[in-house]
Image (cartoon, helix red, strand yellow):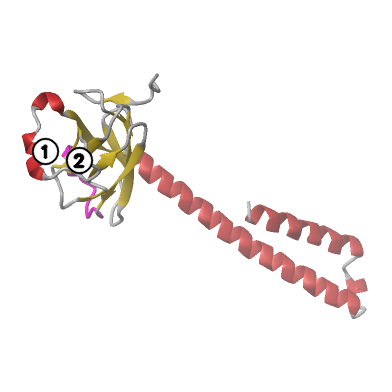
Amino acid sequence: LLDSGWAIMEGPALLVIKPDNGKIPFPNQLHMSATSELTLSNVSNGLVAFKVKTTAPKNYLVRPSAGTIAAGATEKVQIIMQPRKDTSLDSASDRFLVRAASTTSTQPLSKSEWDAKAKHELQELKLTVQFADHEQTITRDTDVQQRRRQYEEMQAYGAQVEQDVEMLHKELQSGHGKSGYSIFHVFVVMMIGSLISYMAVM
C-alpha cells in the first residue's frame, strides 16, 4: 500500500523515506545557506527511533538529527548546508546515513543504546549530496537579472508617461492645449501609460 514515490530502506520494514533516489538536492550557489528536506514515514506497528548522521558535520545542520516516530506518523528532517565559498563540487562527496530501529520509549536512543542494537535490528539508508547543474543555475540567475532590469526600465518609462500626461492636462486646463495637443492625443498617451503600468506589475 506504499506510494511508489517512496524509497524503502534496507533492513526491517520500519521507515520509508523521501526523496526516493538516494540524493539530497541542493542549489549550486555561493555565500548562502541552503536547506533540503527528508520525510521519514513510520510504516511499522510500533514506535521507531531514528538518527541522521553525516560525514561532514561542520558543513551541515540537521534538525532534528534524532528522535522517535509513532506508528503511521511522519517526521520532516531539515538539512541545512552552510554557505560555500567556491564552486567546486567537493561537497558532492558528502554522505548521510539514516538509521532506524524499533523502540518502546518516546525518547531518542542514546549512543550506547544504538551500539547495543544487532545489525538485523537496524534499518539503514545511505544518501549523497546532489547539486543542481552549474550551467542551469547560471542561466536561471541571468534570467532573473534580465527580468528585474526590464521591470525597472518599464517602471521608469511608465513614470515618464505619467509625467507627460500630467503636463498635457495642465496645458489643456490653462488653455494652451490648442497649440498642438488634442483630446485624442491625451487619450492615447493615457492609454499607453495605463498599459505600461499594467505590464510593469506582471
Furthest toward the top, the residue is 1
Residue in the foreground of this view, choosing between 95 and 164: 95
Height in image: 51 above or below 42?
A: below
Say what amino acid the circle numbered 2 marks.
Lys
Label 2 SS: strand
Height in image: 10 above or below 113?
A: above
Label 1 SS: helix
Q: Going by the image, does 187 lie left or right of 196?
A: right
Residue in the foreground of this view, choosing between 78 and 163: 78
Foreground label between 2 and 1: 1
Residue in the foreground of this view, choosing between 168 and 122: 122
Q: Residue at x 88, y 69 (%)?
A: 180
C-beta proximity under 8 Å, tags 2 and 1? yes
The answer to if 3 sits in the magenta stretch is no
Say what amino acid the circle numbered 1 marks.
Trp
- Magenta part of the chain: 83-93
- Residue under label 2, please give it: 51
Q: Which mark is residue 114?
A: 1
